[in-house]
Image (tube, rainbow, N blue to C red):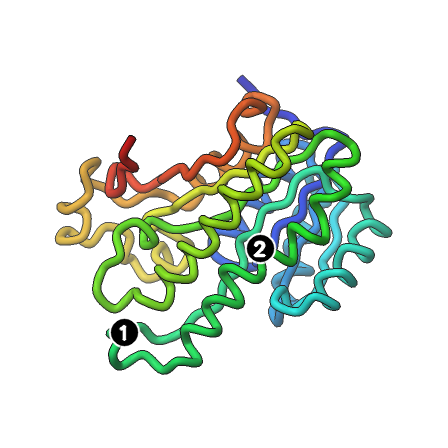
Amino acid sequence: MNISFEGKTVLITGGTSDLGRVMVRQFAKSGANVAIHYLKNSAMAETLRAEAESYGVRAAAVQANVTKSVEVESMRDKVASALGMPQIVVCNAVSQYPWTTILDQPLEHFADQFETCTIHNVLMAKAFVPDMVEKKYGRFIGINTECSALCNPNSGAYAAAKRGMDGIYRTLAKEIGYSGVTCNQIAPGWMISDRDRARGTEHPPEAEAKIPMKRRGEDIEIANAALFLASDLAGYITGAYIPVCGGNVMPGI
């Protein structure tokens, strides 16, 4: 079964990241016009824009700090001007920082993760969801992580911030469900990316032995989950936290 997004527009934050690039390509291949958000990597954003357009869709690269309200609102206006308001928003951007124990982690790292994992999603919802609600159609999708469920040592700042994000998505799903707009999360495991392929580090035996499916996932498997949730096939799924991690995380009932 082919999923088509012809006539629709998707905005992907962190569009130049490992997972973001693959989502940009897969949505473009499926007919969606694509807005590619970036913070600093303008060269990659322009490369992706040209690649997306090679599939016969329209694309735009938009720069913003997604933790700043004025910049998110400016990004909304730029996307609307270039491509129209998006029916699909995928919140994928996150900052990187050195992991250590909670006792040793500087407080500023907790604040930074809260800003990029939680506040980022709040600002994106405020900027883009009202238009979806008004039109009674939309898909608001967040890229969470298996780490928010695993809570492994040294992941405190990241896990706490992604758990905050989870609370936003579950609450928002209930607040806007009446409108037909869905609000869901994808929780990737440790996925294979182009960096792994370039380094030859795709399949570390010790790590894969601990995964129920005995393999790391491919980045395209996250993109496939995003396409599913963005499609009409998932029209009655909202408030979900969907692990794509080979069974590493199995939410309880």
Q: Residue at x 15, y 51 (%)?
A: 205
The residue tagged with tag 2: helix, strand or loop?
helix
Query: In the rendered image, which residue does mark 1 sit on?
Result: 102
Q: Picture coordinates of residue 135 (x, y %)?
A: 78, 32
Judge whether residue 79 can be spotted in this image: yes
* Contact (Cβ within 8 Å) of mark 2 with mark 1: no
Give the residue type at disc 1: Ile
Instruction: Find residue 200 and report its image quarter.
Output: bottom left
Q: Which disc is residue 121 wearing?
A: 2
Residue 252 sits above or below residue 192 on the image? above
Seen from the viewer's position, the closer of residues 178 and 216 is 178
Q: Please state, as top left, top right, bottom left or bottom right, where the C terminus lies in the image.
A: top left
Q: Residue at x 57, y 43 (%)?
A: 172
Judge whether residue 15 can be spotted in this image: no
Instruction: Find residue 2 and report its image quarter.
Output: top right
Q: Picture coordinates of residue 241 (x, y %)?
A: 42, 39
Q: Is residue 16 left or right of residue 250?
A: right
Give the residue type at disc 2: Asn
Instruction: Find residue 211 and report its image quarter.
Output: top left
Give the mark, 2 or 1, whose residue is nearer the N terminus: 1
Residue 64 sits above or below residue 146 on the image? below
Check disc 2: other Cα within 10 Å, few if <14, some if 14-19, many if 20+: many
Q: Picture coordinates of residue 208 (x, y %)?
A: 19, 47
Distance from label 2 to label 1 (Cα)?
24 Å
Q: Residue at x 62, y 36 (%)?
A: 139
Seen from the viewer's position, the closer of residues 17 and 185 is 185
